[in-house]
Image (cartoon, helix red, strand yellow):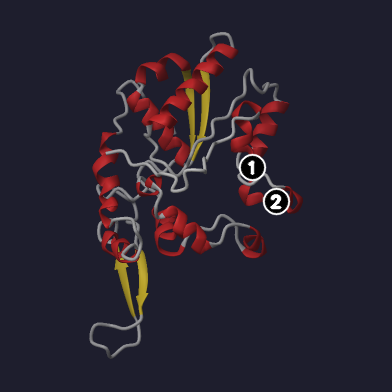
Amino acid sequence: MVCYTEVLDSDTEIVVPDDDSGLYAIDILDPSWFVKFIHLSGVYHFHDMIDMLVKCGYKKGTTLFGYGYDFRQSNRIEKSMEGLKAKLEAAYKASRGRKVNIISHSMGGLLVSCFLSLHRDLFSKYVNKWICIACPFQGAPGCINDSLLTGLQFVDGFESYFFVSRWTMHQLLVECPSIYEMLPNPDFNWKTQPQIQVWRKQSDDGETPAKLESYGPIECTTLFEEALRNNEVPPSVLKFRCQDSCSWKIPQWICFKL
């Protein structure tokens, strides 16, 4: 099963910019003049890395490229896979047949792993090395908890007033297939089992004003179902990660070094 989101307004089209050889889309998440003016560091994504690589001699459009994608969609959706394929081909040709080194961050690593699983021949042809930074291969419990229960917040303190609010982000993310692909893997041997602790207003016996409840990787599904009950997204979407994560099979010839 591969999920995707649809635009409800037929007059609206969401397009990921490909300016500056794709680097514009991954540089600053909100490139508005005000964000740049107050320097909201929380949304400066690959900005410093791009500057560093340019100073090291990499040339935009020749040896340095970026790939932006619609983060709401499933990481395996055909449009994203074809887009990454085209970007790798362009980088390969621009560098006169030299294989590409990929640097991915967070959920971008899931996108690359999906491409590796679905197009291993192309990956072997175009990619030399893959540097993966903070990828949630076994899920991102903290991110999921915030996304589904309270809303995710990229920046804190005073700066948060100038970015998307928690509730607005919550309403956006609960309908994004990619979020459910980051549910914690219940079969993974966690060193410390991820848990959600929630204070209930009243205990079952009605004698205490509040009760602390804990939910593990499997039990948290019931909590998320309760949180999503008043949304249009069916609770069955919570099964999506458990059913599909095991199909991201990494070829045997790939080895990971720490």
Residue sitting nearer the eye, 133 or 180: 180
Q: CA distance from mark 1 to mark 2?
A: 9 Å
The percent position of residue 227, horizontal first and vertical second, equals 34, 65
Q: Residue furthest top?
A: 96
As drawn, the label of residue 35 is 2
Tag of residue 28? 1
Question: Please, is residue 182 above or below residue 194 in the view?
Answer: above
On-image quarter of the N terminus = top left
Q: Please identify the residue farthest to the right as the structure is shown.
A: 37
23, 18: nearer the viewer: 18
Q: Is residue 61 above or below residue 37?
A: above
Q: What residue is at 60 percent from the left and 42 percent from the top?
A: 45
Whole-percent x and y of residue 162? 65, 59
Left or right side of 203 for 19 = right
Residue at 24%, 47% in the rendered image: 187
Contact (CB < 8 A) between labels 1 and 2?
Answer: yes
Position in image of residue 93 (x %, y %): 55, 12
* Residue at x-position 28% and y-position 83%: 203
Amino acid at circle 2: Val
Query: Is residue 2 left or right of 258 when viewed as pictured?
Result: left
